[in-house]
Amino acid sequence: MRPWDAWAVRGAAVALAAAGLGHTLWHGVAEPGTALAFAALVALGELARRDHHEHRAASAGHLPAEDRRPAPLGSAAALTYALLGEAAGHPTRHGALQTVAVVFAAALAAAVPYIARGGGHALDHVARRVLTVAFAAACFQPLHDSGRLEDLTGRGPCLVGFLLALLGLTALCDAVLAAALARAGTGWPYGPLLRDELRAQLGIGSAICATCVVMALGVAVAGLWALPVFSVPLLLTQMSFHRITEIRVTYRQTITSLARATEIAGCTRPGHARRVAALSCAVGRELGLSERELTVLEYAALMHDIGQLSLVDPVPAGATAELPAAEARRIAELGGEVARRTGVPAEVAVVVELQADPYRRQPVAARIVRTVNAYDDLAAVLHPGGSLAALEQLRLGTGRDHHPEVVESLARVLARGGRARVVPARPG
């Protein structure tokens, strides 16, 4: 996916929203009470999603998996309105275009406070919401209004199966759109981004789909009184996600503070651990690592020099790239032992411990940490200002010390980010 694909997504959302608003203004709002109730519920769900952690991540240019704030209530309310054929036993007449208009207006209104704080990517979230709701409504409303849906499915289990299947396709559509927009904003590979979005849909997406079916059938029988009854569990789920995110953010901050201990003690250069972590995650994205693997990689990169705290004689400038293999391995083993005592996941300690081994015996994360750490040391200490020279030295070490694919991925990341004018090596 290229950036122009994201503009195509946004353009399609704008066109649909304009068509929906124009149709609704021209013909008037059908069942205004129902429309207002669903609009309020969508806005409430979207507003509950926003917080300062997401704003901070958006300002950095990307949104890590742990900081993503799902909006199950907003999603469920929007999709339920798209799949609503009856209310309290009476057929509804709002149609697909009014559904798009109501959801767009509610999502945009909820996004205004966030946009005012600098969260420009909230408009992409609105575009996703408009397109996914339009897809669901366009598939359901014409069939229902014409009576063909009842002829095909009746009012029993077949109808429930149809709704679940349609919501499954809608979730797939949303994952494709989310990955496309993330690819345009970050330049990361599309495949891993789509895989992570699909994995996320299996969790909260399943709950949203099930709740949508129950809400749509409940409103069809009991009317709008069913909305608050079925909204409470989703709101509690949303609050639980917020709490989990707070814990993850605090955990990351704790590891980042622990990693700064080497800087405070004068063992490493200021910002070295954070630079290695950021660049390692970029290389991991380039190589297609999953969100779980990227989290382990980030923590290991932050803590990769923690073993230097155990040294009697500090390494000059903390640069371990040119140390003898035995000494580098000893420092790495000390770091792994320290990491285990901090309570980080076992995978993180293993990566820290193996970072100095020959790459053929390393997991992918350890290969990345070793190469990126060497690059940062070489570029800043051994080849000041010479990013290209540092990369060439890494390429010379691909026989034993650095995996060729990791080195070339690092070169592509640096070239794309403008941090070095690098031309990736030609194969053969």
Image (tube, helix red, strand yellow):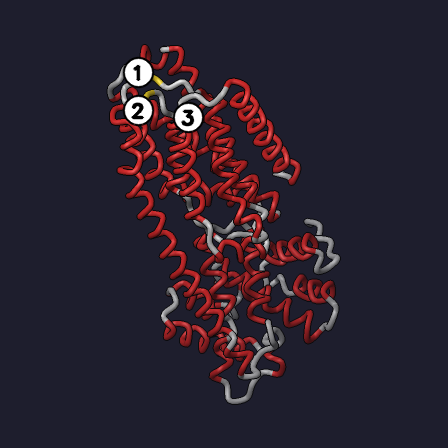
Kind of residue at badge 3:
Pro
Disc 1 and disc 2 in contact, CB within 8 angstroms: yes
- Where is residue 154? Give x, y as percent: 28, 14
Going by the image, does 389 lie left or right of 47?
right
- Where is residue 130? Give x, y as percent: 51, 32
Can you tell which mark lies on residue 153? 1
Q: Give whichever of discs 1 and 3 has the lower sequence position.
A: 3
Q: Is residue 178 at all visible to an observer of this figure?
A: no
Q: Nearer the viewer, mark 2 or mark 3?
A: 3
Q: Which residue is mark 2?
A: 161
> Residue 261, relative to residue 81: is it above or below?
below
Kind of residue at badge 2:
Gly
Q: Which residue is mark 3?
A: 32
Can you tell which mark lies on residue 39? none
Q: Is residue 307 at all visible to an observer of this figure?
A: yes
Among all residues in the image, which is located at the extreme bottom? 312
